[in-house]
Amino acid sequence: MAGTKEKVEFEIQSDLINMLEHIKDKFDLPSTDKVLRCMLDYVATDGDWDEIFDVRRCIRCGSKTGWEV
């Protein structure tokens, strides 16, 4: 485990919790915490921040319920 970790609290929708759990199981990761750290590492190092944060993605508008398998 590289680096010191700090416990944080934040709110996300239940479909995103399901997504983190799905990724954990699919890639045999030890926890959803690890999934989120991997995703944040990707955003920090390889993600195109303009594409990530400037593009509006509304997956809960209208009849949509959020992330699905």
Image (cartoon, grey):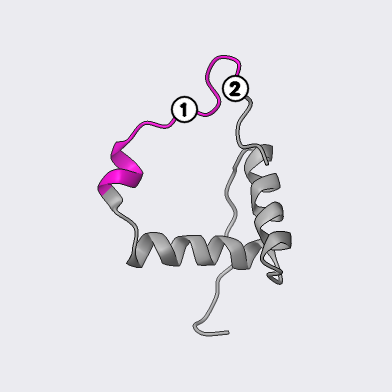
Q: On the image, which quarter does residue 6 sit in?
A: bottom right
How far across and down, in percent of the image, does residue 51 sit?
Answer: 30, 44
Q: Does the magenta stretch include residue 53?
A: yes
Q: Does the magenta stretch include residue 47?
A: no
Q: Is the magenta stretch mostly helix, strand or loop?
A: loop
Q: Which of 63 and 11 is in front in this view?
A: 63
Q: Is mark 1 on a helix, strand or loop?
A: loop
Label 1–label 2 contact, CB within 8 A:
yes
How far across and down, in percent of the image, does residue 24 sit?
Answer: 69, 61
Whether residue 6 is situated above or below residue 49 in the rendered picture: below
Q: Distance between the residues labelled 1 and 2?
A: 9 Å
Whether residue 62 is situated above or below residue 2 in the rendered picture: above
Mark 2: amino acid? Lys
Q: Is mark 2 on a helix, strand or loop?
A: loop
Q: On the image, which quarter does residue 62 sit in?
A: top right
Circle nearer the N terminus (1, 2): 1
Magenta residues span 50-64
Whether residue 53 is situated above or below residue 33 in the rendered picture: above
Q: Which of 33 and 58 is in front in this view?
A: 58
On the rendered image, what quadrant is the N terminus found in?
A: bottom right
Mark 1: amino acid? Cys
Whether residue 2 is situated above or below residue 27 in the rendered picture: below
Q: What residue is drawn where x is 59% and y is 43%?
A: 11
What label sits on residue 64 in the rendered view? 2
How far across and down, in percent of the image, does residue 56 sit?
Answer: 36, 31
How far across and down, in percent of the image, does residue 40 sit?
Answer: 46, 61
For the residue carrying disc 1, how many other residues have a C-alpha within 10 Å: few (<14), some (14-19), or many (20+)? few
Residue at the disc numbered 1? 58
